[in-house]
Image: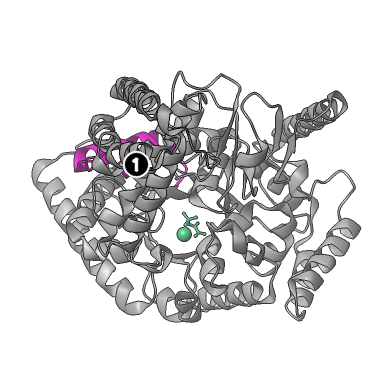
Amino acid sequence: MMARVMVAERRILRADREAELARLTTALQAADDQLQGVRNYLNGISTDGNALIETQRLMLRSPEIEGAARRMIADEALAAEWAVTRALDHIRATFAELPDPFFRARGADFEAVGERLVRVLLDLPEIRPGTGARRGAIAVCYELTPLDPYQLQRAGIVGIVSERGGKTSHAALVARDLGLPYVAGIKNLGVHVHPNVRLIVDGSRGEIVLDPDEEMVAGYRSRAASSQQRLLSLSSLRDLPAVTRDGARIQLAANVESVAGIVAARARGADAIGLMRTEFLYLDRTDLPSEEEQYTDALAALRAAEGIPVTFRTLDLGGDKLPASLRIATGSNPALGLRSIRFSLERPDVFRTQLRALYRAASHGSIRLMLPLVSGVTELERATAICDDVAGAVAHLRHKTQESAEAEVGPPVPLGVMIETPSAALTADHLAGRCAFLSLGTNDLIQYAFAADRGNDDVADLYQPMHPAVLRLIKMVVDAARAAAVPLSICGDMASDPMLTWLLIGLGLTELSMDPASIPVIKSIVRASRLADAEALAQEALSLQSEVAVRALVERSMTEHLSAETPIWRGDHSDG
Ligand code: PEP
Ligand code: MG
């Protein structure tokens, strides 16, 4: 997480240079004390927070930060915070040029340390997990990594705003999974938001209100209360099936990142866990999780699922998910580089360890495995060969050791493919013939179809799930799955949006996997709808030329057919 501070250019009198150097010395010590405090905090909750913090302590005293800042104060009479900022600019430029992606990524550590020092020099409050945050406070950040929402929640933060990032970034999905309201992509945050200012974060509308007056606060409080009330009334649907008025059963599954997410999904009546993002076990640490740990984790997930099927997605590392324990080359376009299944094929040792854990767990519950970011048949064949090999070895070992004497040896674990690249969508018929099921990952599919980075707010407007290109891609995959009689689900964020429910079921999707918090409202829509109306809508939408026309059609049609009480707008249902 970076909380980039805006620092004004400031020079000092030459006569004051000694005093300024002393000020820097004091600040370096204070920043170092803070880092030791963070290390102590992480000792209790992170497997190995020490190494990272120790590295940052060394960076603080490095020639690049301390050395450069001292030189600029002594030679150019710069104020200490301005000298550190200049040193950081230099570091940023140097690291950006490094050919080795691993070392290039270490630039972020330098930045974090430098920012900490600048905050000390400016007397700004420390940003850290744990005691640094006031309970109930809102975190204002420059950019979030997927891990940050966990740490912020542990620290008692109740909402997050960031300057960079998109609403389908992994950090945003994690925040939603945790029930933390998060608004990304607010320009010049650092200039406008100061410590102790009052802030409203409306995660459901993607808005923030700075320094609201009492009337506004009251308005938002009452909106939050009525949204809570609506959610409460929807909870009566928990044990009812999602069936349309004309009798079509729609499976409503959940996307989760943790065992806690599974518990939340069960509480909301999920029919299945349609996407378990396993890679989060790799992120909050500097070592690799062992097979045993992954096995135990999978068992905990199955226990929490209480018998509903769980689809474990195999490692989706790379891109914006870079664990400290692995050197993953990012290239100059991380999202287009060595991520997901590409990385797993590049590092079969890591992939096989995870697979062994999951295949071992499979004898204790209803499990499916799903491969992310498959680009076509060749890649699928390579991954399938590894999966089959590991499954065979696990079965053999089980037979020999009777490891799970109490567990039945069940049917083979279904292996599915995520459709997340245009190449996979275009060859979905071939892929369907070679796997047990398909799942549409539209967050990535849209990113790659529109060539628009999902984590970059500058191009966030291009995320248009109602665009004819998206509808056609989905239709193509639905047709391919139907022809091959292979089950198909959708686990992209589209499935969580009530306004898209008709389009999705109308296009032929029968399993929607979503953020657990969205299940009640989507169920209420399914139960209030007729599939025939949704199909007519989807049919007409497919003939339209733009997302603007599709949106107008959806709004008209859903408002006309659904009762006024059925919530269809995002802003009316979310927990955020
Ligand atoms: C997707 O890309 O739609 C998806 C579900 O996977 P993730 O969001 O984890 O990339
Ligand atoms: Mg994806």
What residue span does the magenta drawing correspond to?
Answer: 281-310
Horizontal placement of 117 versus 518: left or right?
A: left
Residue at image point 59% right, 72% down = 474
Instruction: Residue under label 1, please give it.
Output: 75
Out of 93 and 509, give the one closest to the viewer: 93
Asked if residue 27 shows in the view, the reply is: yes
Residue at image point 79% right, 27% down = 221
Residue 532 image-quadrant placement: bottom right
Inspect the image, locate mark 1, and give the three-letter code of the amino acid beneath it: Asp
Identify whether 397 is placed above or below 550: above
Out of 291 and 250, give the one closest to the viewer: 291
Residue at image point 49% right, 30% down = 152
Quarter of the image with the C terminus in it: top right
What is the x, y in percent for residue 500?
71, 59
Please identify the residue farthest to the front as the structure is shown: 15
Label 1 near ligand 1 (CB < 8 Å): no
Identify whether 120 is placed above or below 397: above
What is the x, y in percent for residue 83?
41, 40
SS at circle 1: helix
Q: Is residue 279 magenta?
A: no
Horizontal placement of 266 versus 19: left or right?
A: right
Mark 1 Cα-neighbour bin, 10 Å: few <14, some 14–19, many ≥20: few
